[in-house]
């Protein structure tokens, strides 16, 4: 697999402290920031810490401590071979059920360095995607052969929640291995009670001492538990993607007949799930890289401690641990490749959907333009008809006006002697008034229209659009703005154009 993870060299990020001793943990700036964070630690009345003390003489015993005093006395009054401390949250977004003072007591009692703040800071809230790569394993060795290891693993869990039934959980692990004598320590941080990881740890140590097992046994248990659901979660994401992809490939976006389609009316119903899917794949890739780095560091730590003589004669166990970590790494790398492929397909499908919606918008704009052109042509035709009516009106209105002034006294339908129809000898007055008034009215209209025509011809054209075309802006998809601007310009040209000018589109 080709990635930056392959460039890591054995021993990288592993500090050999020699005889130097770290300063007190509670005075460290990182720990001070940890204790200042809200929602990480609980109030004194909500404490619940489970501790398992494992010793060859007394066996294994679990204790549930529910206040700071009990917790402080317990960790200071006994020193078993191995101690497991399990700290839980009621829910992913709830504080850990341990107070600041109890956490400080544990850190001081075991001289735990400030690095542990990296895993504590990830609890008390929902996992942040921007911090998905911060949980890789760190190892620190001392001159007496002991080793501090810590990491944060993200794993997938199936739930009964409606909607998205898969959720990302976190488990924080701190392990101090002491090869000779008592003092080995495990600290587990869980996002909710009774996690699958803690159930398997408890089930593995009821009847035998953990001192009789290889130190990496619980690490293998944690890794195998966190790998359980990755395949099924990625398969669920792929099914979700295939459903959207099939919809895109079978839908006729470019046809104007689908303008009433719900998918066209609400394109966000497709774009939003695709973007959400790509966003999830992006954070999953980071989480998987972090897990791969943790597996590699665990294998390196196994080699280092084995070379130091840890559990002499356990070559078979050591080889088993190496094989398990190699298998875990291969499986995680396979999941990482699947996530990369899913992410790339989501990106390509998103581009396809965007292009398809642009084509649909183009069809819509073409329809709108055709409607505008048809309406404009009808308007021009109506204007020509109105012009004819106006001219006829102009011809007859003066005569009607004169007739209304002079009345009908110019004509007599019965003469003085009882004869027939006669015309007054003053009829010439009607002609003399009507004809000049008609000529004056028609002439004034003609001069006014010619003046407006010349003024328009002297003005520069609003735009050089002769034929309406619609171009798709593939970069921004701003199709509506382009079409609106061109339609507005076309309307202005058609409004100013003379009636005899032919409108083409």
Image (spheres, rainbow, N blue to C red):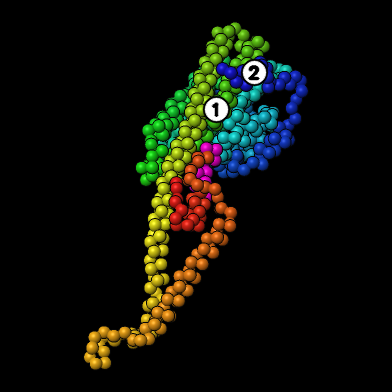
Looking at the rendered image, the quarter that the N terminus falls into is: top right
Label annotation for residue 285: 1
Please determine whether, in this image, residue 67 is positioned above or below residue 332: below
Viewer-side residue, 476 vs 489: 489
Give the residues in magenta: 474-485
Residue matched to label 2: 7
What kind of element bears circle 2?
Answer: helix
Residue drawn at (47%, 40%) of the image: 358
The percent coordinates of residue 330 (x first, y second) are 52, 17
Q: Estimate the spatial distance between the alpha carbons at disc 2 and disc 1, rounded to whole Å.
A: 18 Å
Q: Quadrant of residue 128?
A: top right
The percent coordinates of residue 402 (x first, y second) are 40, 80
Residue drawn at (64%, 32%) of the image: 118
Using a 10 Å C-alpha cutoff, classify the residue at mark 2 as few (fewer than 14 neighbours), some (14 to 19) or many (20 or more): few
The answer to the question of whether label 2 and label 1 lie on touching residues, with beta carbons closer than 8 A, is: no
What kind of element bears circle 1?
Answer: helix
Image position of 97 (left or right of 28)? left
Q: Earlier in the sequence, mark 2 or mark 1?
A: 2
**Is 439 one of the magenta-colored residues?**
no
Please determine whether, in this image, residue 501 is positioned above or below residue 199: below
Viewer-side residue, 487 vs 415: 415
């Amino acid at each position: 697999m080709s990635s930056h993870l392959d460039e890591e060299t054995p021993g990288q990020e592993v500090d050999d402290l020699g005889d130097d001793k770290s300063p007190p943990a509670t005075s460290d700036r990182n720990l001070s920031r940890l204790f200042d964070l809200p929602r990480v630690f609980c109030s004194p009345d909500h404490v619940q810490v489970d501790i398992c003390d494992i010793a060859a003489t007394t066996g294994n015993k679990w204790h549930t401590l529910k206040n700071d005093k009990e917790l402080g006395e317990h960790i200071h009054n006994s020193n078993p071979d191995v101690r497991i401390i399990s700290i839980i949250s009621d829910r992913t977004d709830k504080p850990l059920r341990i107070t600041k003072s109890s956490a400080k007591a544990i850190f001081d009692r075991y001289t735990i360095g400030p690095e542990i703040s990296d895993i504590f800071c990830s609890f008390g809230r929902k996992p942040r995607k921007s911090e998905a790569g911060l949980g890789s394993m760190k190892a620190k060795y001392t001159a007496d052969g002991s080793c501090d290891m810590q990491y944060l693993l993200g794993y997938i869990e199936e739930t009964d929640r409606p909607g998205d039934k898969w959720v990302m959980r976190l488990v924080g692990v701190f392990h101090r291995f002491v090869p000779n004598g008592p003092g080995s320590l495990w600290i587990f941080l869980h996002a909710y009670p009774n996690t699958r990881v803690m159930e398997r740890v408890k089930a593995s140590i009821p009847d035998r001492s953990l001192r009789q097992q290889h130190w990496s046994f619980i690490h293998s248990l944690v890794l195998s538990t966190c790998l359980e659901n990755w395949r099924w979660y990625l398969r669920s994401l792929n099914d979700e993607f295939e459903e959207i992809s099939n919809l895109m490939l079978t839908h006729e976006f470019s046809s104007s007949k689908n303008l009433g389609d719900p998918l066209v009316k609400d394109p966000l119903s497709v774009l939003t799930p695709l973007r959400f899917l790509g966003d999830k794949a992006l954070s999953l890739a980071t989480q998987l890289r972090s897990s791969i780095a943790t597996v590699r560091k665990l294998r390196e730590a196994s080699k280092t401690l084995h070379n130091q003589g840890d559990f002499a004669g356990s070559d078979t166990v050591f080889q088993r641990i190496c094989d398990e970590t190699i298998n875990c790494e291969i499986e995680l790398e396979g999941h990482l490749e699947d996530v990369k492929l899913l992410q790339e397909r989501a990106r390509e499908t998103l581009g396809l959907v965007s292009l398809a919606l642009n084509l649909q918008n183009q069809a819509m704009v073409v329809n709108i333009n055709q409607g505008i052109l048809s309406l404009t042509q009808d308007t021009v035709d109506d204007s020509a008809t109105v012009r004819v009516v106006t001219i006829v009106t102009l011809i007859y209105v003066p005569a009607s006006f004169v007739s209304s002034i002079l009345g009908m006294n110019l004509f007599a339908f019965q003469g003085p002697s009882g004869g027939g129809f006669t015309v007054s000898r003053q009829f010439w007055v009607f002609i003399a008034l009507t004809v000049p008034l008609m000529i004056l009215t028609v002439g004034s209209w003609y001069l006014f229209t010619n003046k407006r025509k010349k003024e328009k011809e002297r003005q520069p054209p609003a735009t050089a659009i002769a034929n309406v075309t619609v171009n798709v802006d593939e970069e921004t998809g701003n199709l509506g703005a382009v079409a609106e601007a061109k339609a507005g310009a076309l309307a202005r040209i058609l409004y100013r154009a003379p009636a005899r000018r032919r409108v083409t589109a």
